[in-house]
């Protein structure tokens, strides 16, 4: 970690600066919290809030924008402007959940937003596990009682330990994508509520699903299960990559005090190998589809978001005594 990289990260948006201060420079809590408060009124956080509808939603819908023509999904890509993705971004930006704006947003969405699939009230959850994982994470972060959704997710776990949005269609194998979405939600819920033995056991089984595969390998062949797992993306939306998984394991360990699992080492080695000469990490790709605004300089360019996440993972790994992989 170099001073030049830290300075580059700090010369950015409040949503990045406060996390750099907390996670990388060990600034006093009073300082990073003061910086975090600026998310609501400056930069990307304020810009995203400016697009909010009067009824509390974004783009007039829960999952898809109002009046969305589904041919756009096929021809252009999935849109990312509706309520569920806006809420997740505000959580990742660090909007203070105790702020009046956040509390009012939660209240309005609960009163006015309904899911496209099934017409359920927003905070009762959707039908797919990956969407419900993110809804639990957002709800727990913003102080909503999402315990009924958590109970559903615990009951939808597959025999191999993880989750899959295709379960209702007959899938018996877990998905990296769905599993990380659910794990993040359960972790946020445990952080907010203390969790339960059943929740902690479910998290352990989902973690074991990923760890047994070294975060990216096929259990059957040993080859990468999907080459995109090794390409860094931000925002991830519903997509999985090894940096997202490593950041999850870091956050989980900070909550529980667990030591790093040695099976993370190969993914850590790969993360280190992708560092650029200037000390940053690149944005490898982005998902197509409409957005409110871009959060990075573009594909192939150094990314502050990827770099922030990579540096805090490596700082945690080193401080916790994680060992490098001995594999060639």
Image (cartoon, rainbow, N blue to C red):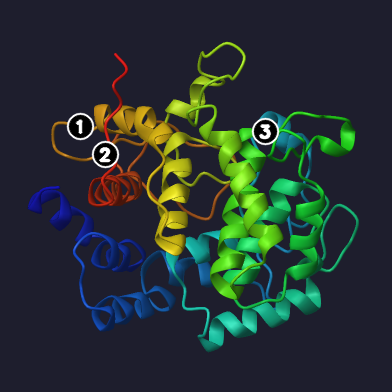
The percent position of residue 71, horizontal first and vertical second, equals 77, 35
Give x and y (percent) for residue 137.
Answer: 61, 62
Secondary structure of the residue carrying numbered label 1? loop
Residue at the spot 52% in from the left edge and 60% down from the top edge: 89
Q: Is residue 31 above or below residue 295?
A: below
Spatial distance from mark 2 to mark 1, Cα to Cα? 8 Å
Q: Quadrant of residue 62?
A: bottom right
Residue shown at 44% from the left, 77% from the top: 40
Q: Secondary structure at mark 2?
A: loop
Of badges 1 and 3, nearer the viewer stands 3
Q: Return the x and y of residue 39 as percentages of the image width and height.
A: 39, 73
Name the mark nearer the viewer: 2 or 3: 3
Label 3 Cα crowd, 10 Å radius (few <14 / some 14-19 / many 20+):
many
State the CA–CA distance, disc 2 to disc 3: 29 Å
Mark 2, mark 1: which one is toward the viewer?
1
Residue linked to disc 3: 175
Do the numbered discs 2 and 1 sit on residues whose CB atoms are within 8 Å?
A: yes
Using the rendered image of the protein, determine whether residue 138 is visible from the camera's viewpoint.
Answer: yes
Left or right, 213 with respect to 140, comes to left
Q: Which residue is mark 1?
A: 276
Q: Callout 1: 10 Å neighbours few (<14), some, many (20+)?
A: few
The residue at which mark 2 appears reads as 302
Q: Secondary structure at mark 3?
A: loop
238 vs 267, left or right, is: right
Q: Of the residues under marks 2 and 3, which one precedes in the sequence?
A: 3
Give the farthest residue toward the left. Answer: 3
């Amino acid at each position: 970690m170099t001073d030049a990289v830290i300075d580059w990260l700090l010369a950015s948006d409040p949503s990045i600066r406060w996390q750099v201060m907390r996670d990388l420079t060990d600034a006093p809590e009073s300082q990073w919290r003061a910086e975090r408060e600026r998310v609501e009124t400056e930069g990307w956080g304020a810009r995203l809030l400016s697009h909010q509808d009067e009824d509390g939603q974004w783009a007039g819908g829960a999952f898809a924008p109002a009046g969305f023509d589904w041919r756009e999904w096929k021809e252009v890509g999935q849109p990312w402007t509706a309520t569920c993705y806006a809420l997740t971004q505000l959580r990742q930006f660090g909007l203070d959940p105790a702020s009046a704006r956040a509390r009012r947003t939660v209240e309005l969405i609960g009163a006015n937003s309904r899911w496209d699939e099934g017409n359920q009230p927003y905070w009762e959850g959707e039908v797919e596990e990956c969407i419900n994982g993110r809804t639990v994470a957002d709800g727990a972060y913003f102080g909503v009682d999402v315990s009924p959704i958590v109970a559903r997710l615990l009951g939808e776990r597959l025999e191999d330990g993880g989750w899959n949005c295709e379960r209702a269609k007959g899938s018996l194998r877990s998905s990296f994508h769905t599993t990380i979405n659910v794990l993040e939600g359960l972790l946020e819920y445990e952080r907010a509520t203390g969790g339960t033995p059943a929740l902690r056991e479910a998290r352990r089984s989902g973690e074991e699903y990923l760890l047994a595969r070294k975060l990216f390998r096929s259990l059957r062949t040993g080859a990468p299960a999907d080459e995109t797992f090794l390409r860094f993306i931000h925002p991830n939306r519903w997509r999985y990559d090894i940096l997202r998984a490593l950041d999850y394991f870091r956050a989980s360990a900070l909550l529980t005090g667990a030591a790093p699992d040695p099976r993370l080492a190969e993914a850590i080695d790969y993360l280190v190998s992708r560092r650029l000469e200037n000390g940053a990490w690149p944005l490898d790709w982005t998902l197509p589809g409409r957005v409110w605004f871009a959060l990075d300089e573009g594909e192939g360019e150094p990314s502050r978001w990827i770099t922030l996440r990579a540096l805090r993972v490596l700082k945690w790994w080193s401080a916790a005594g994680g060992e490098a992989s001995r594999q060639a």
